Image (cartoon, helix red, strand yellow):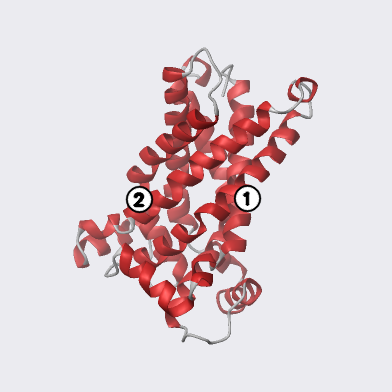
Amino acid sequence: MELSLAHPAIKAFVCGSFSGTCSTLLFQPLDLVKTRLQTSQSGMQPGSSRVGMTSVLLGVVRTERLLGLWKGISPSFVRTIPGVGIYFSSYHSLKQHFFQDSRPGAAQAVMLGGGARTVAGVVMLPITVIKTRFECGRYSYVSVSGALRSVCRSEGPTALFSGLMATLLRDVPFSGIYAMFYSQAKASLPQEISSSSSAPVANFSCGVLAGVLASLVTQPADVVKTHVQVNPQLRTTEAVRYIYTAHGLEGFFRGAVPRCLRRTMMATMAWTVYEQMMAHVGLKS
């Protein structure tokens, strides 16, 4: 069946999955560096010298070669391709159901983005746990399916949902805040720009602004989420206490630069590609 004849939600899913594939392939190294920076805290003594983004990047290339920067790309694809598709499909369906004849306001955009991310986040959490473990370098998993079996066998299926609260506290606000800033920034563009050939560039700029703001707001939850998923014996509150005791408030912003770069560019590229594809198949995004 041709995509042009498919249900709108399926079109949104396909467009979102394709956009997620492109952005994941490009920005996976930033996610790996972010995870290594955050998990390196566990082996550090309070007051010891900091490990920076550049040193982690060079260390990975030196010990694992250039392709080591794409370690964890398999679970990232398994997570992102359906995950971004589910997000955009849910977003489109919710928007069509509640705001078919009107433009969502700031508060409505937060609810749309947050609601869609809740659905995608819960469904894809087991793969998110495996992806984080692949990237941290502490586990010797060979494949995604093997990792899933290993976790279920040694820790129980509930381990695949470790960090659920921290993940939702990170992803739901990020998506809600991003959708709000992005939609409001786009709405403020002059009509002659929105309808011109430079519209994708203008939309990309709006996405960058929205991504930076949303990333900074949700960075502490991302650090907590990483610690809980790498150390499943930790509860969310225990991870928060450990990070603060060992590293102070600064510890909650560990890996902020690579995460901000990655999340901003991934979300911006995903939205830009998604909107262009949706326009190509005759749907308003």
Location of residue 64 in the rendering, given as x and y in whole percent from the top left corner: 55, 74
Q: How many residues crowd mark 1 within 10 Å: few (<14), some (14–19), many (20+)?
A: some
User: Who is closer to the viewer here, 3 or 136?
Assistant: 136
Q: Is residue 231 left or right of residue 176?
A: left
SS under mark 2: helix
Location of residue 113 in the rendering, given as x and y in whole percent from the top left corner: 47, 35
Specify the quadrant of the image occupied by residue 30. bottom right
For disc 2, the marked residue is 125
Extreme-top residue of the structure: 101
Q: Type of residue at label 2?
A: Leu
Above or below, 60 relative to 2: below
Closer to the chain start, of discs 2 and 1, is 2
Q: Which image quarter is the C terminus in?
A: top right
User: Who is closer to the viewer here, 150 or 276?
Assistant: 276
For disc 1, the marked residue is 212
Q: Which image quarter is the N terminus in?
A: top left
Q: Is residue 38 visible?
A: yes
Which numbered marker is on residue 187?
none
User: Who is closer to the viewer here, 144 or 211?
Assistant: 211
Location of residue 39 in the rendering, given as x and y in whole percent from the top left corner: 45, 72
